[in-house]
Amino acid sequence: MAAVKIEGKVLAQQVKEQVKQQVEQLKQQGIEPCLAVILVGDNPASSVYVAGKEKDCNECGIRSVIHRLPEKSTQQQVLDLLQTLSKDNTVHGILVQLPLPSHIDPQKIIEAIPPSKDVDGFTPVNVGKMMIGQPCFLPCTPAGCIEMIESTGVDIAGKNAVVLGRSNIVGKPAAILLTAKDATVTICHSKTKDLQEKCRQADILVCAIGKAGFVTKDMVKEGAIVVDVGINRNAEGKLCGDAAKEVEEVAGYLTPVPGGVGLMTRAMLMKNTLVAAQQVKL
């Protein structure tokens, strides 16, 4: 029996609808939520992502301000802009689109974002708070993964979860959030031994390894929830995930690519921007 698709489009629309209603309430109190995005250079993929975020902001009634800087901008110029946005009380969320040009240190840039405006959830303060279970801005992709898993109605508590990949943006935080939901979590990576066997024990499998079709059906437990974070292009140039198409033959639930985690990630950014604006009036 084919896996049930966890439709990112439907879930993301629900989240954005809730955000829109609460944005309207804030506007009635004189607060207009605003997201400032910094885009350095002309990376085509980054430009597409930023256009998508702008569209989401429009749908939710959030003001979006895009700061487009030339590829040759210095690190100091980006830091100066960040300082200006940090002090601007009309800006509630700040997002720096990654990757940055190679001459700019992304960590230095991320650390310059005030934690109260860090709607990507990347600053050390927010990462640290997430680690110890304090309220904070959660990174959008892992938070979206959790919402997608919970949408199946399956209780995460007590389940074996395997996270394929250990990036700071997806793998590590996904493992922390699953642990917070009382799953028993294993992080697998390029040095993991018996990878296939470990994956096959997972009730919940998060694929965030960045290799097209890497996860095959013999790596997936029958009935498992498979969250495919990968966005790759196959030999034909078609968008695909980390899970091969055959995985849908054994998985119980599966997120599609495209139309899955990516849309949910963007919706969670809208949610974080709303929360950042709500905190201003507290």
Image: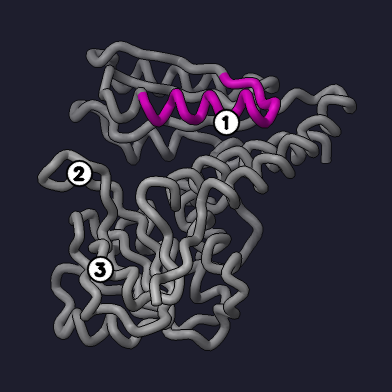
Closest to the observer: 275 or 50?
50
**Main SS category, magenta section:** helix
Q: Among all residues in the image, which is located at the extreme front?
A: 1
Residue 220 image offset from top left, x and y in percent: 30, 79
Horizontally, is 260 left or right of 134 in the view?
left
Q: How many marks?
A: 3
* Residue at the (60%, 80%) spot, across then down: 155
Q: Quadrant of the N terminus?
A: bottom left
On the image, which quarter does residue 50 sit in?
Answer: top left
Give the residue at mark 2.
Answer: 233
Residue 163 image offset from top left, x and y in percent: 34, 70
Give the residue at mark 1.
Answer: 56
Tell me: residue 205, above or below residue 17: below
Q: CA distance from mark 3 to mark 2?
A: 17 Å
Q: CA distance from mark 1 to mark 3?
A: 32 Å
Q: Among all residues in the image, which is located at the extreme right?
A: 29
Give the residue at mark 3.
Answer: 246
Per the image, label 1 sits on a secondary structure element best described as: helix
Task: Look at the image and say whether residue 14 sits in the magenta stretch.
Answer: no
Closest to the observer: 160 or 33?
160
Q: Residue flagged by tag 3: what amino acid is it?
A: Glu
